[in-house]
């Protein structure tokens, strides 16, 4: 539970540094309509805007959630924070064997226009990697995250 709260706080702080806060009344009706079609029950949402993307951040069932929607009302993605212990054993085994010595710092399930994935951030000293796995547990890719970008 503490990890989830810390994760949500980190996401909101990080988001706040790069995006501008937006009051819900200033979110275009088409964006709100798309959001309500994806999230059907009422939630306490913090809206931000970065470029042409509106982001809704909230907590549902004690899990941090982010929904990104273009200002044209096109849904981009929904990302659910999950505890690392909920990762499938096959993914945990892959991380332990290929990324030995790395610590899992963030785990999410991302539903995106290009597919649905587990996205896991791992860190070893200043080496931060974002690992992507298909929901069927197959490894998809690894991307290095710049430490200075992550700290902002």
Image (spheres, rainbow, N blue to C red):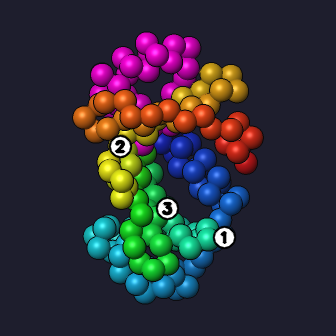
Q: Secondary structure beneath disc 1? A: strand
Where is residue 116 drawn, in percent x and y? 32, 48
The residue carrying mark 1 is 20
Using the image, tell me which numbered label, if any, was put on residue 117.
Answer: 2
Q: Which residue is mark 3?
A: 57
Residue 100 falls inside the magenta stretch: yes
| Location of residue 72 by image quarter | bottom left
How many circles with numbers are drawn on the protein? 3
Which callout, 2 or 1, points at the residue further toward the start of the chain? 1
Res 112 visible? yes
- Res. 45 visible in picture: no
Q: State the quadrant of the N terminus.
A: top left
* For residue 116, side relative to residue 84 (left or right): left
The relative height of residue 16 versus residue 131 in the rendered view (above or below) is below
Give the percent coordinates (x, y) of residue 35: 37, 72
Residue 150, image quadrant: top right
| Element at label 2 | strand
**How many other residues sit within 10 Å of disc 1, few (<14), some (14-19) or many (≥20)?**
some
Disc 3 is placed on an element classified as strand
Q: Residue at x 41, y 31 (%)?
A: 84
Residue 135 is covered by the magenta coloring: no
């Amino acid at each position: 539970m503490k990890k989830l709260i810390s994760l949500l706080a980190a996401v909101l702080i990080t988001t706040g540094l790069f995006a501008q806060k937006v009051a819900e009344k200033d979110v275009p009706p088409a964006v709100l309509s798309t959001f309500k079609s994806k999230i059907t029950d009422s939630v306490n949402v913090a809206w931000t805007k970065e470029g042409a993307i509106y982001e809704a951040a909230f907590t549902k069932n004690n899990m941090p959630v982010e929904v990104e929607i273009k200002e044209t009302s096109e849904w981009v993605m929904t990302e659910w924070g999950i505890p690392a212990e909920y990762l499938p054993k096959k993914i945990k085994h892959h991380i332990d064997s290929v990324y030995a010595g790395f610590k899992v710092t963030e785990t999410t399930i991302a539903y995106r226009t290009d597919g649905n994935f587990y996205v896991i951030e791992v860190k070893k000293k200043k080496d931060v990697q974002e690992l992507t796995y298909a929901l069927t547990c197959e490894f998809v890719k690894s991307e290095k995250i710049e430490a200075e970008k992550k700290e902002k």
